[in-house]
Image (cartoon, rainbow, N blue to C red):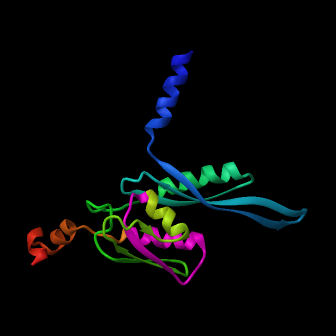
């Protein structure tokens, strides 16, 4: 019996996905009999190795909403190209709703200079050195989506060279 428990623990540890709840809101819907309560959870899922997703879940209880948010986040994964110093390859701007997020690479040792939902998304993506600024909105969902949008827009040097049909070394000239 001890082996079974040990195996299940190992199986659980093998998943390197982390999930962080950004916000839980109690929402109400007015129906014929009164008000119906439910919960909305904004969840960020990432493996700290260049993949991250933002998900939203709604359910009658908090645990159900978080589970749905995790499932939604895994459906909307974004691949993030990271440099050797775990930073971004170039500056990027992302939009989500009324929110705009501006991000630019930073020198090694800088850390994640960002606030709120933007910080959570960047940390779970595996970015360790970045400067970011939220513009236009304080809404955590829109800021998280704007960050994911900015990360999705990132391209590596090799991708740019391939699009231009030139060798990578010629980009630096």
Camera-side residue of 138 and 165: 138
| Residue 3 horizontal side relative to residue 48, left or right | right
Q: Residue furthest bottom?
A: 136
Magenta stretch holds residue 28: no
Picture residue at 57% right of the left edge, 15% below the top: 1
Residue 134: x %, y % from top left = 50, 78
| Residue 55 horizontal side relative to residue 15, left or right | right
Picture residue at 35% right of the left edge, 72% below the top: 153
Q: Is residue 25 visible?
A: yes
Q: Residue furthest top?
A: 1
Q: Is residue 77 visible?
A: no
Q: Residue furthest right?
A: 33
Q: Point out the stretch of residues depicted in magenta.
A: 125-151
Residue 2: x %, y % from top left = 55, 17
Q: Eyeballing the image, is 67 above or below 98? A: above
| Residue 71 horizontal side relative to residue 58, left or right | left
Picture residue at 47% right of the left edge, 59% below the top: 53
Image quarter of the C terminus: bottom left
| Residue 28 horizontal side relative to residue 5, left or right | right
Camera-side residue of 144 and 124: 124
Residue 44: x %, y % from top left = 53, 58
- Quadrant of the image occupied by residue 91: bottom left
- Quadrant of the image occupied by residue 110: bottom left
């Amino acid at each position: 019996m001890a082996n079974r428990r040990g195996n299940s623990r190992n199986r659980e540890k093998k998943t390197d996905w982390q999930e962080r709840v950004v916000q839980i809101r109690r929402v109400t819907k007015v129906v014929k009999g009164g008000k119906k309560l439910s919960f909305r959870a904004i969840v960020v899922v990432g493996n700290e190795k260049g993949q991250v997703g933002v998900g939203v879940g709604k359910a009658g209880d908090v645990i159900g909403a978080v589970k749905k948010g995790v499932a939604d986040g895994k459906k909307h994964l974004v691949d993030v190209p990271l440099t050797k110093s775990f930073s971004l390859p170039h500056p990027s701007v992302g939009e989500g709703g009324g929110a705009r997020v501006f991000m630019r690479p930073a020198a090694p040792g800088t850390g994640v200079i960002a606030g709120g939902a933007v910080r959570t998304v960047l940390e779970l993506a595996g970015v360790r050195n970045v400067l970011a600024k939220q513009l236009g909105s304080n809404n955590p969902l829109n800021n998280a989506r704007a960050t994911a949008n900015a990360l999705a827009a990132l391209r590596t040097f090799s991708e740019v060279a391939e699009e231009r049909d030139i060798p990578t070394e010629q980009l630096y000239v």
